[in-house]
Image (spheres, rainbow, N blue to C red):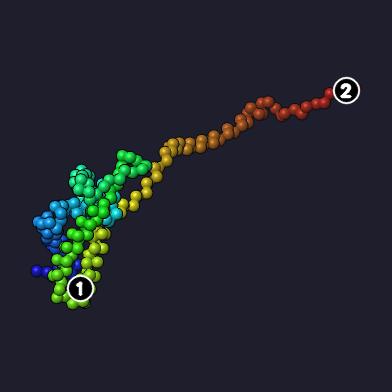
Amino acid sequence: MPRLDPRMQLALQALALFPRFTRWAATRVQGGELGRGLSLRQFAVFAALRAGNRSPGEVAARLNVTPAVVTGLVDRLERRGYVRREVSIGDRRRYSLRITEAGERVCDEVQQALARQLAAQFAGASAAALAECSRALTRMEQAVAALERPPAPAPAKPARPSPARQAPAKPAREPRAAVPAKPADPRRSSARGPARKPTRRSTS
């Protein structure tokens, strides 16, 4: 079996690890009092808002769900006082989302609790190993951020100029052949006789 490229092997390990980590976090949040009865998707809304996404459409794009799903999540968070809607001044049909102080406290509590449980697993790691893991996670975060960016549009091909319609050129007419002049008939000139010079009349 051919050996995998190191980059491909790292990608496969990450793809296998991320779902397991998500399942573990979801179990810890939803299985007890840690998450205050909130779902992992609701915490994903918190994370999206903390990352700077303010409109429901931006949150939906980050969570890869429909805006209708975000509306339901926000409704439940708003009823518990964790999120509020703020109407836009320029357009009252639009609104932005904000995390309340109570929502910030819940997010910090859950994040710190999960971090403490995860940090306990690195108790025996050396400082060099921890620094190496940190560099690897930073590089992984950069890779995921690059994947989340929309692809750049392909450069537009220059339009081909349409050929100008020209009237078909008329075929050049062939020059007419010169007709040779007929030679003078000597008989006619001799019958007339020599040409007479005009005489001047006397005025006396």
First-in-chain label (2 vs 1): 1
**Residue type at tag 2:** Thr
Return the mark for residue 130.
Answer: 1
Residue sitting nearer the eye, 183 or 16: 16
Relative to 123, residue 14 above or below: above
Disc 2 target residue: 203
Corner quadrant of residue 6? bottom left
Q: Residue at x 24, y 63 (%)?
A: 141
Label 1: few (<14), some (14–19) or many (≥20) C-alpha neighbours in 10 Å: few
**Is residue 183 in view from this perspective?**
yes
Q: Residue at x 12, y 55 (%)?
A: 30
Residue sitting nearer the eye, 203 or 125: 125
Instruction: Locate the C terminus and report the quarter of the image it occupies.
Output: top right
Q: Residue at x 19, y 75 (%)?
A: 129
Label 2: few (<14), some (14–19) or many (≥20) C-alpha neighbours in 10 Å: few
Residue 55 is situated, as x and y percent measured from the top left of the image, at: 28, 47
**Residue type at tag 1:** Leu
Instruction: Locate the N terminus and report the quarter of the image it occupies.
Output: bottom left
Residue sitting nearer the eye, 41 or 198: 41
Answer whether labels 2 and 1 touch (C-beta < 8 Å).
no
Residue 143 is situated, as x and y percent measured from the top left of the image, at: 24, 62
Corner quadrant of residue 142? bottom left
